[in-house]
Amino acid sequence: MIRVGLIGFGLAGQAFHAPLIGVVPGMELACILDRGGALAGHKYPDVRVARTLDELLEDEQIRLCVIATPNPSHFEIAKRCLLAGRDVVVDKPFTTTAAEAAKLIEIAEERGRLLTAFQNRRWDGDFLTVRKLIAEGTLGRIVSYESNYDRFRPVPKLNSWRERNEPGSGVLFDLGSHVLDQVFALFGAPQAICADVFSEREGAVVDDAFFLRLEYPGMHAVLRSSMLASAPGPRFAVHGTGGSFVKYGVDAQEHALRQGNLPTAREWGENPESEWGTRYSPNGTMQKVKTEPGDYRCFYSNVRDAITEAAPLAVTAREALRTIRALELALRSSRERRTVLWEG
């Protein structure tokens, strides 16, 4: 049994990490670091609640530390946990700079500890469907990949740390971490990035929209996000020499977890037929494609297996570093109004 200490009990800790850890066989949620609130103790009365990181780390039987705190704190907390001899999961974005990410990797390798980032959207059902179609060659040679992550939230939440002018804030680091990790999982690092990172909402003090174009040999990827999209674009639109695939709507797991549903039902992660994507063949025919079941539990079951050396780690720390480098390059491209070559 891998005993887990969860550091932070805001949205990420409550809706994602605690529920997933609690249902994965071989893992035990042993301690929650909740600095001042009573919610952790109320929701998990059988789990010890710590008020400081020192208090959590005093329990030497805690093997894995999961960091679900505001982005600017990721580096220092992860560093302390690694130096204390613990394996570490850091919520995305991994860190706020590539230099911080590289330092954590150095410490983890020196200490022989597992280190990874919570890139759960590799287990979105729609992304798994796209990945399957590409792997099977159904769409032929891919020439264009588009991913939109749109929402309609017209009023900034200025009391939220995600929308304050701090390192790692803004929608690029928030949602860009997901769409970049997904495109890298499919195609690897690009040759160049051209980005426009900006704000659209009145009163916004950090970016709330982005447009990224990633150049690959023989193809390109376009990644977009907006908080003012009352009519969202396709979640995925993939075009190739053998046809196209277009999918609207978002994976339902986040909404279910936010509603307090546990991922234990047999139909967890299923997408209704009305929301399946469509494959367009070169001869003009259309065919609905069943969405693969999504399952965020796979992230933690893989972490468990990697700790016990039963399987390789699915999301490596160096992949997380690659995503942070891409975020930095996107910001540079947007600031300098030019295409930048890939570095690293």
Image: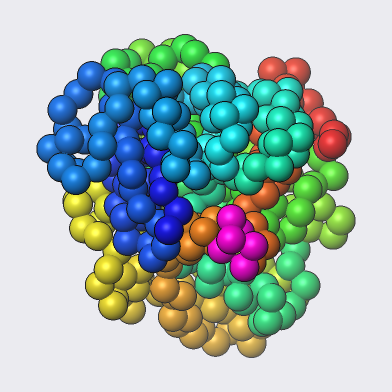
Q: Is residue 58 left or right of residue 13?
A: right
Image: magenta residue range: 305-310
Query: Which of the two residues, 157 or 254, is positioned nearer the viewer here?
Result: 254
Farthest residue toward the left? Answer: 42
- Residue 330 appears in the picture as rendered: no
Residue 7 vs residue 331, the one in the foreground = 7
Question: Where does the image place residue 16, in percent across and percent down from the top left?
Answer: 35, 47
Percent from the top left, x then y, of residue 201?
A: 38, 22
Q: Is residue 274 left or right of residue 43?
A: right
Assign the N terminus to one quadrant of the image.
bottom left
Q: Is residue 121 above or below residue 278?
A: above
Q: Nearer the viewer, residue 265 or 325?
A: 265
Verify whether residue 306 appears in magenta: yes
Residue 267 is covered by the magenta coloring: no
The image shows residue 118 at horizontal and vertical percentages of: 51, 46
Instruction: Using the image, determine if residue 22 lies above or below residue 80.
Output: below
Expressed as whole percent of the image width and height from the top left, the position of residue 37 reads 19, 23
Q: Which quadrant of the figure contains the C terminus?
A: top right
Residue 276 appearing in the image? yes
Query: In the figure, 237 relative to 331: above or below?
Result: below
* Image point (54%, 78%), residue name: 279
Residue located 44% across and 42% down the image: 61
Residue at 63% from the left image edge and 46% from the top image edge:
114
Residue appearing at x 57%, y 78% in the figure: 280
Q: Is 145 displayed left or right of 41 in the figure?
A: right
Quadrant of the rendered image containing residue 87: top right
